[in-house]
Image: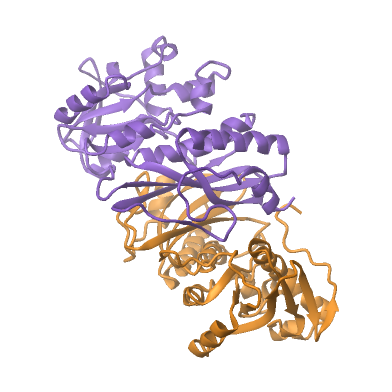
Chain colours: A purple, B orange
Amino acid sequence: MAEFSIIDTYFNRHTSTSVDLGVGDDSAVLTPPPQQQLVICADTLVAGRHFPLDTNPHAIGWKSVAVNLSDIAAMGAKPHSILLALSLPQIDHDWLKGFSQGLYDCCDQFGVRLIGGDTTQSPHLTISVTALGWIDQGQAITRAGAQVGDLICVSGTVGDAAFGLQHRGHELQKRLDYPTPRCELGQHLKGLANSMIDVSDGLAQDLGHILAASKVGAELYLEKLPLSPALQQLPDQQKWHYALAGGDDYELCFTISPDHYKILKQQTPHVNITMIGTINNTNTLSLLHHHDSVVLDLNGYQHFA
Amino acid sequence: MAEFSIIDTYFNRHTSTSVDLGVGDDSAVLTPPPQQQLVICADTLVAGRHFPLDTNPHAIGWKSVAVNLSDIAAMGAKPHSILLALSLPQIDHDWLKGFSQGLYDCCDQFGVRLIGGDTTQSPHLTISVTALGWIDQGQAITRAGAQVGDLICVSGTVGDAAFGLQHRGHELQKRLDYPTPRCELGQHLKGLANSMIDVSDGLAQDLGHILAASKVGAELYLEKLPLSPALQQLPDQQKWHYALAGGDDYELCFTISPDHYKILKQQTPHVNITMIGTINNTNTLSLLHHHDSVVLDLNGYQHFA
């Protein structure tokens, strides 16, 4: 089966999202909305590395979109469309059916359209997705805006995906397989948060990127880390390790002034947001447990271990 | 070495191309030029499939950019920037140095900037590049615009890359390793050509996409095919096979009205453009050699053979 048949069969669905020219030409063509900036990112999933080899194809399809929409959300942008570069060892129609369904399910949930890409044969399953979004001119929330005195917040719960990876079959495995990009919250934080990142490599490492980019330090309050019940029951060191060094949660970590934090909590009473620390001028990340300093050996996910 | 160090070491060069936020955040941010549409594509190179395993890393870096700029050129658009998703078996600094140099050499030649992407570990070397370009509103040249009576033209010479693949060490190997995206010609054809595609899978197959998208047919004049001296010396069947079924040339194939063709030739006397056929209303592709019908068994490059 040639590339063209795979695309026609599995990846040529039309949706209503505005695109001038989608799948099926040399390139896709889009008209930028007025006064908007383009936000764009690309992330790759490699079988056996970013997901266990026996992960169901529907989850792989979902996750390859979700991790990219998470990067769009982390800028405060509205996701618009994706391109898919799919490298497959062979044509397995059951696999392709499940994968494309998962990919479209995630696209549909977040109003995103597949507009291009290609399929190639490769000895190893590799999925690269490029995601595009739009944001009001000058409103993107970068990693570099954290201010001394900002509160550090995180959405949802952290450590679930890493726990799910080590406890396959546990209900938290769905947090690993079907991460939820925080698209709505990300957009809501426009004009409120000073800096933001998504938690893909572990909270400590990802927060570290904010600190480095913003040239600031932080205190993190371990007792405030938002944990799922399964993690709450673990010994301290173990739960902190999951929460701080476990990747793949795709929650948003952001810093916000105390005044904007109050506004945010009033505006979004039903969104799970936890204040877990404060930005200071120390240039280091200090971990505190009820005011006591804690030293942990944390290594976030290393792409080349 | 973590992903971040690889990016900082090899892929964090700054250039003057206008980007609001480049490598180093969750996403890149670009301000669209006024009255322009975004043109975007993604193409993957898999080691051993899209280039021989012993290809030098500089050529791999060049080619992964070039094949994508070719897709931007085939819309008539001006290339602007790329994202790189690089999946590597291991960290080989010599390889990365050569690869990144080749990538930047191609970017520099065409005024393009690397604005994002990621690096991941994978058992198999796979390179996905997303390319972005801009084009005046409504001016993109698609595959669907061919008109009955149009002349079919191709830039440069065809079949060289396929010949180079089968004759490693021959000077034509550079056409395989270092394809030249026809960026300037592509933009020049805006407002002149009615349809366009780049020749990546073989001229017959790629022209076939224009015919299918435009719902027309064509006559192709085999004696007019532009061939390099090495191919001109081959038996007819063999040279036609290289020219029509050989992929990877990255020349532009376009259709144009006879009036516009005259204008084009006047405006670009020094650009190598050859008229090789005409569009008709038959819905088939007929091959003619000095008016005699010729039947060839042509299979373009099949991604899943």
At 36% from the left and 47% from the top, the residue drawn is A134
| Above-or-below relation of A37 to A151 | below
Q: Looking at this view, is A182 or A43 the one in front?
A: A182
At 34% from the left and 46% from the top, the residue drawn is B25
| Above-or-below relation of A211 to B22 | above
Q: Looking at this view, is A290 or A248 the one in front?
A: A248
| Above-or-below relation of B296 to B233 | above
- Horizontal and vertical percent position of residue B253: 62, 73
- Horizontal and vertical percent position of residue B126: 58, 51
Q: Quadrant of the N terminus of chain B?
A: top left
| Quadrant position of residue A13 | top right
- Horizontal and vertical percent position of residue A239: 39, 17
| Quadrant position of residue A77 | top left
Q: Quadrant of the C terminus of chain B?
A: bottom right
Left-right relation of A190 to A48: left
Residue B1 visible, this angle: no
- Horizontal and vertical percent position of residue A186: 33, 35
Left-right relation of B197 to B240: left
Numbered circles on residues, count: 0
